[in-house]
Amino acid sequence: MIKKVGIIGAGTMGNGIAQVFAQSGFTVKLCDAAPAALDRARATIEKSLGKFVEKGKLSASDRDATLGRLEVAASIDALADVDYVVEAIAEQVDAKLAVFASLDAMTRPHVILSSNTSSISITTLGAATRRPDRVLGMHFMNPVPLMTLVELIRGQATSAASMAAASTLCAALGKTAVEAADYPGFISNRILMPMINEAIYAVMEGVGTPEAIDTVMKLGMNHPMGPLTLADFIGLDVCLAILNVLHDGLGDPKYRPCPLLRRMVAAGQLGRKSGRGFYEY
C-alpha cells in the first residue's frame, strides 16, 4: 500500500509533484540538498494552493491539511521509509545514476523508484540498481498541479506489476496515464521538440518574427501557446538538452539542435527564468 511518497529535487517540477501528491492525501517527503530550494518550494506550494482556495477549487481546511502532509528534508537518507519515490532532479544522466544507486541501497527492496525525466533512458537508470523491474519513468507535465497528463515509461526490465502500480497512483492523483516505450524523448518530447526546433530555425532564417510564428500556431493550429513562448517557459537550456538526447540517441540529423538555440543558451538567454529568451520577461 503506497501512503508515503519521497520526491527528490525541489525545483519547478519537484514542488509541483509534491503538491499533487500531498493534495491527494499522501504523506510527502520532499528532499533537496539546497535548503534555499526547499524554502522556495514550500513558498511556491503555499502560493499555488492559495490560488486554488481563491478560485473555490479547494477549501482553506483542505489547503492546511495538504501543507500538514508535506515534510521537507535536506538529506536523501530521510527517504528510507517511503513507499514510492519520484526523482525530479536536473536532466543530467550521471547525477540521476548516482541518485538511483543511492536510493537502491537505502529504500526497502519492494519500493518502486520512478524518474520524472523528460528524455533520459529508463533502462539506463534501472541498470544502476538491483531492482530494474521496479524502475520506471513517471513524466509529469508542467505546471504539474494543472496538467492532467503523466507519461509512464516502461524500461527494458520494468515489470507489468510496477507499471500497474504507477498507473493506479496516477488515477489517485486525478491524472491520466499514457504508456510510452523507452525511446529517446518518449512520446511527448519526440514530437514537441522537433516542432520547437523548427520554429527556431524559422526565426533564424527570417521566415517570421517570434510573434508571427507563435500567432500562426495559436490561431492556425489552435495551440494554447506558440512554440517559442512554450520554449521560453520550458527553458531553452532544457530544450537544447532534450534535442541533444534525441540527436545522440536516434542518430537522425532531423533532430540536430538549431545553431540559434545553441547561441542563445551559450549567451545565457534561457527564456522566462533568465528574463530573456525569444521574448523579454
Image: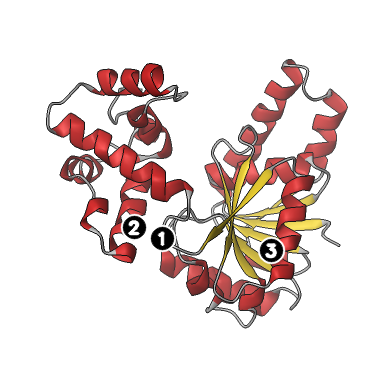
Q: Choose between 52 and 61: the one closer to the eye.
A: 52
Q: Residue at x 42, y 33 (%)?
A: 233
Using the image, determine if residue 60 lies above or below residue 158: above
Q: Inspect the image, locate mark 3, and give the three-letter code of the amino acid beneath it.
A: Met
Give the x, y percent position of residue 37: 55, 46
Q: Inspect the image, locate mark 2, and give the three-letter code of the amino acid beneath it.
A: Leu
Give the x, y percent position of residue 254: 24, 52
Label 1 sits on residue:
184
Label 2 sits on residue:
246
Q: Quadrant of residue 85?
A: bottom right
Q: Choose between 156 and 16: the one closer to the eye.
A: 156
194 left or right, relative to 260: right
14 left or right, relative to 111: left
Count numbered badges in the picture. Answer: 3
Q: Badge 2: few (under 14), some or many (20 or more) residues near its Cα, within 10 Å?
A: many
Q: Residue at x 59, y 48 (%)?
A: 14
| First in sequence: mark 1 vs mark 3 | 3
The secondary structure type at the circle numbered 2 is helix
Residue furthest out toward the bottom: 130
Q: Quadrant of the N terminus?
A: bottom right
What label sits on residue 81 in the rendered view? Answer: none
Q: Choose between 114 and 254: the one closer to the eye.
A: 254
Label 3 sits on residue:
163
Q: Inspect the image, locate mark 1, and give the three-letter code of the amino acid beneath it.
A: Pro
Q: CA distance from mark 2 to mark 3?
A: 24 Å
Are the residues flagged by discs 1 and 3 in contact, CB closer than 8 Å?
Answer: no
The secondary structure type at the circle numbered 3 is helix
